[in-house]
Amino acid sequence: MPAPTPPSGEATSNALPPIPPDTAWAEVNLADINPEWVPDYHETVEDALLVAIGDGMRTWNAGDTIALPVPQIGEVFRPVIEDVETLVGNNRSYVGRTLAANAPYSFAITLGEHETFGYVGTPQGSYELVGNTRLAWLMPTANMDQHVDYSKPDYFYLDEDGQRIPHEHEH
């Protein structure tokens, strides 16, 4: 699904903050954003923040030092991009590491034609980024999928009549 376009007469630059080219994203106030632009997410995640995606990300290269803000913990990490991959179409992925608290933490960001995904490891836990090419949700990984029990299978089988066959632990 393509990213929503702004209503006629409304410029995106008036709603989204200017972001330096070396910065991945910047926090925005949900109340200041056109609701049509806000990406959907399948659940409400505690401590999720809406961020505007920086336009400069498409020009990053291996060896660049970038800024990855994590407003939830008041930190801006400054990793170096170790690898850039241009994938099918316009998709670009960036990976690298940063040192924090004397330990390496990794990051990965993928910019798609219509979506943006990311992962940032920090000493306070990891964060994931999920959104479109304009806005995304930056969320603590620990708070995601709270309703999912990963100890149980996430699939099921059907019998000849199309009825669900219970897993062994469901008897």
Image: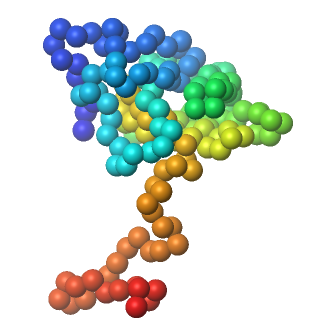
**Residue shown at 34% from the left, 78% from the top:** 156
**Up/down of 79 relative to 146, above or below:** above
**Up/down of 5 relative to 130, above or below:** above
**Residue shown at 67% from the left, 21% from the top:** 65
Task: Tell me if I can see residue 89 in this picture.
Answer: no
Q: Quadrant of the C terminus?
A: bottom left
Coloring scheme used: rainbow
**Up/down of 26 relative to 144, above or below:** above
Task: Give residue 29's quadrant in the image.
Answer: top left
> Along the line of sight, which residue is nearer the eye, 8 or 70?
70
Q: Residue 150: x and y, percent?
A: 50, 67
> Along the line of sight, which residue is nearer the eye, 52 or 49?
49
Q: Residue 125: x and y, percent?
A: 65, 44
Q: Residue 88: x and y, percent?
A: 40, 40
Task: Tell me if I can see residue 74 in this picture.
Answer: yes
**Residue shown at 32% from the left, 82% from the top:** 157
Q: Residue 30: x and y, percent?
A: 37, 25
Q: Quadrant of the N terminus?
A: top left
**Left or right: 29, with 70 as reference point:** left
> Along the line of sight, which residue is nearer the eye, 140 or 18?
140
**Residue shown at 19% from the left, 84% from the top:** 162
